[in-house]
Image (cartoon, rainbow, N blue to C red):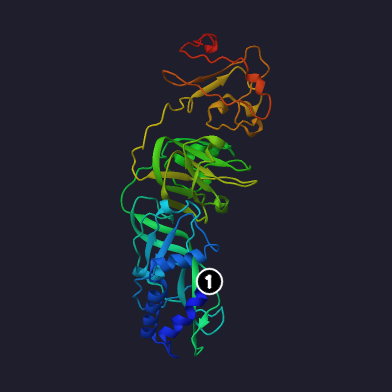
Amino acid sequence: MAVLQAYQADLLKDLSVGSTIDEEAFAEFRRAIGLSLCATKQMARAIGQSMSALVSTERHLWLNLTAIKEKEHLCLLDSPISPSGLFGDSVNMVVNKFEEVKKHEEDFVQFFPCRTQGEGPSATQPCPLPSKTREVKKQSVVDRDPPHQFSAVHPVILEAFCPPPFTTPEQEKSYRLCPVRVLQTYVHRTSQWRNLALNAWVVQSSLGNPQGAAEHAVDGNRDSNYAKGSCTLTKVEFNPWWRADLGNVYSISNVSITNRGDCCKERLRGAQIRIGNKLENNGNNNELAATVLTVPNGTVTFVFEPVNGRYVNIFLPGNDEILTLCEVEVFAEKDKPLYTCGPRNLALGGKAVQSTTNSGLGVAQNAIDGNRQSIHALGSCSVTNGDKDPWWRVDLLDVYRVTRVSITNRGDCCEKRIEGVQIRIGNSLENNGNNNFL
């Protein structure tokens, strides 16, 4: 606040604010403030740095107020507001160069003169909000519509933190300068983009019930009523997750999530969208692209600086959480991959069988569900009984030239059980396929 206090006295002295301020005079006052305090990016940047400890977002944005010309009252309320509606065409969102700042740790702070009436920190005067919008490019946004059009802002949600107002010498009207941070924005787009996740290979941490399969989030159906069979559902668990394998690496900049609408929408709060090429921790350690801050019904689109990756995870950190997704759509700046990945996992979607099954938790299909979780109790491992020559087999449903096989061993115990196993590949089912090529 020291920076603000240093400017206030000189600012008011230079402007020579009178005892009465009509609308025209107030417009002049606003312009003067914009020129003297907020006009230049250099000054805005200096003020922003001085307040960087207060607020932060995942992307660095600056709100430039140099073009304030309307005669609407310029005020901020102590609650989320829409500057696109409040300021109309005077709002010009400018994205700082992301390569110049540390990703995910940038601060967005700007100061706006807030008109209030009377004295004290609670004296505010609401303003009529015009319906104008302003084009915004390349920024962290959240959209209530799918990313099929890109043209204009639907409200940019800001959160204002206003200190007590300073007053004119006559004490008849007061003003305050407010640090503001960007929380979310909403956009529309104009060009058709292809949903890369449609019918992709998917997996989730657990299955709450058979009606909540992971595939329901990529079936192209946005119906948000769980009972209609187009939503996923995990068990109540620690850090549930869902993952889509796009098959190749894309430069991803948009992810749309359709939340459950019949109940329980708050379950999605805090979920993270992670994108990358690694399967360490089932892909949940990949780069964080966006976080679900609000949980409205319907479809919400997250727009962010492009992240290169093959895997898209929805990760919900926390204890006793349930992850439900009614649709996940993934969009890239170009629908052609940056490069084609190596051999894909042919076992995903295959049909697995084994010599015997020890329990309901140890079915053969668990070994090709795409989940590398190695704790048997979490239901993603196969287990046979204590057989003579036990075996497990997957039918790839076609003939392939197989060059590599990866096996995830049990991690909670019994890791030596797998010693001496043989990998056999072929087209014969003689001796249950165990006579095929070693």
- Looking at this view, is 235 or 417 the one in front? 417
In this view, 391 is above or below 201: above
Q: Position of residue 437 (x, y in %)?
A: 49, 10
Query: For mark 1, does the 10 Å Cα neighbourhood hold few (<14), some (14 to 19), or many (20 or more) residues?
Result: few
In the image shown, does 32 or 436 lie closer to the viewer?
A: 32
Looking at the figure, which quarter contains the N terminus? bottom right
Residue 402: x and y in percent read: 44, 19
Q: Is residue 237 left or right of residue 199?
A: right
Measured as percent of width and height from the top left, residue 214 is found at 51, 38
> In the depicted view, which residue is nearer to us: 31 or 128?
31
Task: Identify which residue is drawn at 53% across, 71% down.
Answer: 78
Residue drawn at x 39%, y 55% is: 97
Q: Amino acid at mark 1?
A: Asp
Identify the residue at image location x=66%, y=15%.
387
Residue 80 in view: no
Compared across the picture, whether 337 is left or right of 316 comes to: left
The residue to which callout 1 is attached is: 78
Q: Quadrant of residue 322?
A: top right
